[in-house]
Amino acid sequence: MPENSDSQKLLLATLRGNKSDQTPVWLMRQAGRYLPEYRDLRAQKGGFLELCYDADAAAEVTMQPIDRFGFDGAILFSDILIVPHAMGQNLWFEAGEGPRLAPRMVESALSSLTAAPEHFEAIYATVRKVAARLDDKTTFMGFAGSPWTVSTYMLHGQGSKDHAVARKYAYRDEVAFSELIDAIIDNSVKYLLGQIEAGVDAVQLFDSWSGSLSPAQFEKWVIGPNATIISRLKDVYPEVPIIGFPKGAGDKLAAYARETGADAIGLDETVDPVVAHKNLPADIPVQGNLDPLALLAGGDALKKSAAHILETFSDRPHIFNLGHGIIKETPIEHVEKLLTLVR
Ligand code: CP3
């Protein structure tokens, strides 16, 4: 990407620490089921995974929220479970329930898996198509799940509320768990480097379940692996910003920001913006953190929450976002209202 075109990207500049009088905005899960055009294309293609692995369709879905709302950032349409799929686990989505993975790594050896790197190639094809379509103002973001979060799915074979199987395994079988985490790190680094080579401007690491760990486990399995991934990406692409999103990190947020080397910190909706602003390093950009339910509710709840977040981060580089993914029942008009409020 030539430098003169980069300089027009407000979100990218903000991730690099520039403060502008305009706050860039995008929403986690902005390409998804709250959009009728998404639901149509998904029905046509037969399912979510079919959509992910069809580069033309996935590029189209990535562009849908950009074409409709003009967000400052486009996020690659894919899923964090593509990494376990490429590592050789079977992956499918049960209608109305969610992801399933087999064999469950709590009872299978890593060495029994046969890698399927063609799954990564399909995603890189999507990245190239989107990069060719985006204008020079919109920042293009890739992503991966962080190792702890991805391991919970690989071990349980599905989503779980308390991640107890994974937490128990990490205590009881630390050597095997550590090998699993290392394998996820290696694959995630490879995958993110591939996304960057194919054309993304920045990447986000989703540690959606970091909130379920004790403080010592958080140091070991959240901060450690995220720091390793970030340093390995920085060795190759020091100029590509990395957003860390340790959902539910609570008291550990400042340690995460200091110790992982992430360029920007994603805040979930449980974080008090005033406290985050006080506790985080002064110059680090933050992203967030409107409650997805305030966006769904609209009206005063939306106005007041958005204004408070904008006001609190008014003298720090800030990217407006939700604290977690947009909820599928969210009215389109509330998203439009939010954009008016931010801009
Ligand atoms: O943000 C975006 O718009 C980019 C695409 C994206 C998706 N998933 C698309 C998706 C991203 C960044 C993700 C991340 C993801 N996937 C996470 C971490 C972020 C988070 O929300 O905590 C997790 C834990 C997953 C795993 C996953 N994928 C789950 C638990 C589910 C939900 C299953 C369901 O049916 O609700 C998915 C499916 C999924 N990923 C959908 C989308 C748009 C819905 C699929 C559909 O039915 O159309």
Image (cartoon, rainbow, N blue to C red):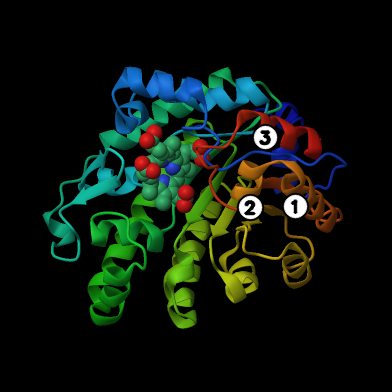
- Under 8 Å from ligand 1: the CB of mark 3? no
Is residue 89 or residue 37 the one in the foreground? 37
Point out residue 88 in the picture as x, y percentages from the top left corner. Answer: 20, 46
Q: Residues within 10 Å of mark 1 (few under 14, many from 20)?
A: some
Using the image, determine if residue 33 lies above or below residue 266.
Answer: above
Task: Label 3, secondary structure: give it.
Answer: helix
**Circles 1 and 3 in contact, beta carbons < 8 Å:** no
Residue placed under numbered mark 2 in the picture: 291
Q: CA gap, disc 1 to disc 2?
A: 8 Å
How far across and down, in percent of the image, does residue 263 sit?
Answer: 65, 55
Q: Which residue is mark 3?
A: 334
Which residue occupies 52% across, 57% down? Answer: 230
Disc ID at residue 29: none
The mark tally for this picture is: 3
224 vs 128: above or below: below
Mark 2 vs 3, N-terminal side:
2
Which of the numbered marks, if any, corresponds to residue 305? 1
Q: Residues within 10 Å of mark 2 (few under 14, many from 20)?
A: many
Mark 3: give few (<14), some (14-19) or many (20+) Cα within 10 Å.
some
Contact flag, marks 1 and 2 (Cβ < 8 Å):
yes
Identified at 15% across, 54% down, the residue is 103
Mark 2 to mark 3 CA distance (whole Å): 13 Å
The amino acid sitting under disc 1 is Ser
Residue 89, x across and y down, in percent? 20, 48
